[in-house]
Amino acid sequence: MLTQNQLVPGLYFNVTLASLMTTYQLPHITYQEGESTVRYVYVKENAGMWDTLTAFSYKLCGCYPYVRVPNLLCVSPQTGTAAITLPADSLLMRGTGTYAGDMLSRIDMADLDGSYGIYTASNPEAQRRGITRVRQILMDKQFLYDPNDGLRWRIQCSNRRMRSTVLRYIGYCGEDCEDLVTCGDLTARVSRITVSCENGKLTTEDVFYYDDFCNAE
């Protein structure tokens, strides 16, 4: 629903998560409590609510939004330090992965007059992988206060899921997205969880992303 619904385009000042989420009555969705305020967000034409929430979360605390059970939208990171221990003797698989399908190598952004050449940002992660994917964009009104911060945000979003570790084990230990988990020599926060049951056997697959938003080094 957050990707399929749109807010009225324009500038929203003194924004809280509640002010965004109460625009429509979206059934079964709850959201993180708190009255932390962002000075403004800019809603682009045809942008889904999720796009606005990603900008809100970044401006609020440099985070990327995520959803916990049951349908709880969060825009700031979990801070608990007590780790959930996964049973190493029930481990079915451990692997690593990488994703570069959205990775940008450079972004050039025009100034308010439409001229290019002032605002540009390169992505070292793309350069290390030999990726050339350049974007030319107009001035992003979401970051008028600091255009270079807007470029950094776009680069970071393009690097989402660039590295990952996957654990699959028998059972389920109750972990949720952003919970701290330990298993053997791994200690990290969970980015994605898949619980399945086949032939009466419950299995859980936890994925741990390593990027600028998840398990940042």
Image (cartoon, helix red, strand yellow):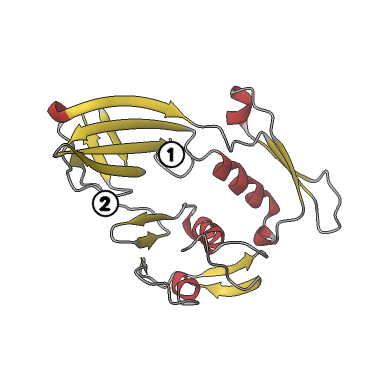
Query: Which residue occupies 18% across, 43% down?
Result: 172
Q: Is label 1 in contact with label 2 (beta carbons under 8 Å)?
A: no
Q: Report the Cα–Cα distance between label 1 and label 2.
A: 16 Å
Q: Quadrant of residue 6?
A: bottom right
Quadrant position of the C terminus in the picture: top left
Compared to residue 20, the image places residue 169 above or below, namely: above
Which one is in front, 28 or 159? 28
Q: Disc 2 designates what residue?
A: 80
Label 2 crowd (10 A; few <14 / some 14-19 / many >=20)? few
Which one is in front, 155 or 81? 155
Numbered badge on residue 29: none
Residue kind at label 2, given as amino acid type: Gly
Query: Which residue occupies 58% across, 71% down?
Result: 7
Label 1 crowd (10 A; few <14 / some 14-19 / many >=20)? few
Q: Earlier in the sequence, mark 1 or mark 2?
A: 2
Looking at the image, residue 15 sits to the left or right of residue 187; the answer is right
In percent of width and height, residue 10 lies at 67, 72
Numbered badge on residue 216: 1
In percent of width and height, residue 74 lies at 39, 59
Q: Secondary structure at mark 2?
A: loop
Query: Which residue occupies 14% across, 33% down?
Result: 87
Compared to residue 116, the image places residue 164 above or below, namely: above
Residue kind at label 1, given as amino acid type: Ala
Looking at the image, residue 14 sits to the left or right of residue 91; the answer is right
Compared to residue 33, the image places residue 173 above or below, namely: above
Compared to residue 46, the image places residue 153 above or below, namely: above
Looking at the image, residue 148 sits to the left or right of residue 26; the answer is right
